[in-house]
Image: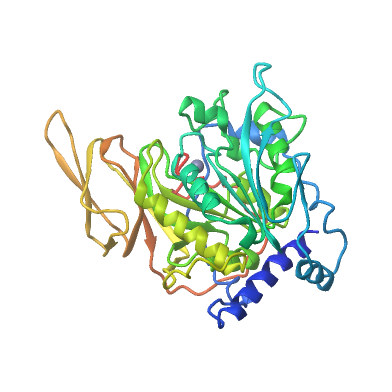
Amino acid sequence: MPQVRALVITFWILIAGLAQGGEVSVDPGDNGADIVEDTTEDADSRSSEVAVAAEHLVDPAPAEAESPDVPLADAVTAAAGAAEPMMLLGTEVAPGTAQRLSWSATELFEGVPVSTPVLVINGAYPGPTLCLTAAVHGDELNGIEMVRRVMHDLSPGKVSGAVIGIPIVNVQGFRRGSRYLPDRRDLNRYFPGNPNGSAAARIAHSFFANVVSHCDALVDLHTGSFERANLPQIRADLRNPDVVTLTQGFGSMVILHSTPAVGTLRYAATRAGIPAVTLEAGGPSQLELNEVKHGVKGIETLVNTLGMMRKHRLWGDPEPVYYRSSWVRADNGGILLSDVSLGSSVRKGDLLGTITDPMNNARTEVRSPYAGRIIGMARNQVVMPGFAAFHVGIETDETPAEDVTGPAVSHTHDSGDYIDGMSE
Ligand SMILES: [Zn+2]
């Protein structure tokens, strides 16, 4: 029952907040309506969106049977009792133990089974199940290392609840150093999947049904794409109160309101009643230690905030929440060299970078149309006119125009902010 699941996670945050002297805001209702407009489009255009639209992704089955039709009080009572064995991927994981399981999509590429590790820590005490997924895009390496560090820092005997970590969801892309599946489809446009659909839809369905359906909350780890890097940040649909509650657990991390594209893991999980956010940090194809540490600290703070572990200290003051953001594009082609860094604060009119034509030496400046902060940017490279170069989180005092609580929108309009594969 999605509602029960969301309430359970809210309950745990509430309890943890009380135990910590009220450091955690416990009224998600306060935060759900402050959204004016999402100008950040996450969609990835490299795969065939037409195919996705035609494929009819299947809505996931409601949450698994372990919490059947119980009212909240019963769910809480169950959570307050003894920890229970977890059944996952055909294996029973006893309370207070860690196991390495293996997930294979039911449909195999080229007839050869492809499996990937699923790390499970079932705590000695009852609590929520937090899932960490990484490398849904196979070239995004920072999240793989984050999952490894978080999982190996946790002691099953001290954990309340369970943590499921999947370091490499798209193992086929990972092996090839590619964002995509071998057929150039973007796996993160096919969730929750379809058992009778394309290879991507089948893989997505298998992963969603066998692993994700066991989660009470989910953090999907990503990086920028195509030689762009992101300031460590949480992307979340802040119209959803349960998601807002989840975002408040990460400590000092920038939070960006972002409506998930249809077919993303974040979109599908949230639709299934599993509050989900994306954690973006750094760029693809590299292991960036500072970004990894930042992400690990955020996740460990979340584990603490959820009341699942008392070892980690809470981390710092919250960072700003950006309800709006926009990309600044190159108007000329040439060599882009930046004058700002990730995290730089900028004023309207500030120089962000220069583009120099390598043939005629003509140099143009890229200036910020907004006051705000650089939350994503291209690495120095050769760009074409129209290339999205700098992502500015915009400071705004705008108040909510409407309470938008519907499902995530599909991005069919051209707002000028559509970025090819820019994030998740
Ligand atoms: Zn990604």
Residue at point 61% right, 80% down?
Answer: 18
Image quarter of residue 12: bottom right
Q: Residue furthest right?
A: 69
Here the colouring is: rainbow
The x, y position of residue 365, in whole percent, is 19, 48
Question: Is 255 drawn above or below residue 293 in the view shown?
Answer: below
In this image, 398 relative to 364: left or right? right
In this image, 72 relative to 243: left or right? right
Residue at point 23% right, 60% down?
Answer: 349
The x, y position of residue 259, in whole percent, is 56, 55
The x, y position of residue 250, in whole percent, is 50, 64
Residue at point 55% right, 31% down?
Answer: 47
The x, y position of residue 224, in whole percent, is 42, 44
Residue 120 visible to the viewer: yes
Residue sitting nearer the eye, 52 or 153: 153
Residue sitting nearer the eye, 27 or 302: 302
Marks counted in the figure total 0
Question: Is 300 drawn above or below residue 214 in the view shown?
Answer: below
Q: Quadrant of the N terminus?
A: bottom right
Question: Is 327 drawn above or below residue 114 in the view shown?
Answer: below
Residue 59 visible to the viewer: no
Q: Residue furthest left?
A: 361
In this image, 321 relative to 218: left or right? left
Q: Residue furthest top?
A: 110
